[in-house]
Structures are given as C-alpha cells and as structure tokens.
Image (cartoon, rainbow, N blue to C red):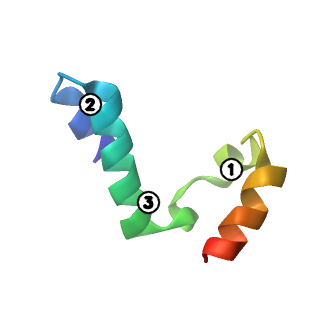
Amino acid sequence: MVKSAIALGNDTDTNACVAGGIAGIRDGIEAIPQRWQDGLRGQELLKPLLNRLI
C-alpha cells in the first residue's frame, strides 16, 4: 500500500505518511516487524503514550 502511494509521485512523503497511517489502522502494530520495533529510538517515550492510547 505504501509503496503504491509513493509510486504515484508528486508529494511522495505525504502520500507515504497517509498510506502508512491507514495501513497502521487496518493492520495494527503487529504488522510492523519486531526488528523494526526494536530499533525504534525513543521507545521509552512512545510505549507509555501507546499504552494510554490503546
């Protein structure tokens, strides 16, 4: 989905962000590979916010 949005051209970074957000809503955090999650900087800030959101 995200790659298809980027391939459309024009404002590719915005298109990728919107498509990624929609894919995240559709597929959930489980769809993000664990190795990507492990490499995320700022996890100590993100996890409490994510827990409050969920």
Task: Note whether 33 is above or below 54 in the view shown.
Answer: above
Q: Which residue is mark 2?
A: 6
Residue 17 percent location from the top left of the image: 38, 41
Near mark 1 (Cα within 10 A), the count class, few <14, some 14-19 or many ≥20, is: few
Q: Amino acid at mark 3?
A: Gly
**Which corner quadrant of the image does residue 6 belong to?**
top left
The one of 35 and 2 positioned closer to us in this rendering: 2
Q: In the rendered structure, which disc, 3 or 2, sits on the residue that comes first in sequence? A: 2
> Which numbered marker is on residue 24?
3
Provide the secondary structure element on which disc 2 rests.
Answer: helix
> Which numbered marker is on residue 37?
1
**Which corner quadrant of the image does residue 13 belong to?**
top left
Provide the secondary structure element on which disc 1 rests.
Answer: helix
Q: In the rendered structure, which disc, 2 or 1, sits on the residue that comes first in sequence? A: 2
Q: CA distance from mark 1 to mark 3?
A: 13 Å
Q: Amino acid at mark 2?
A: Ile
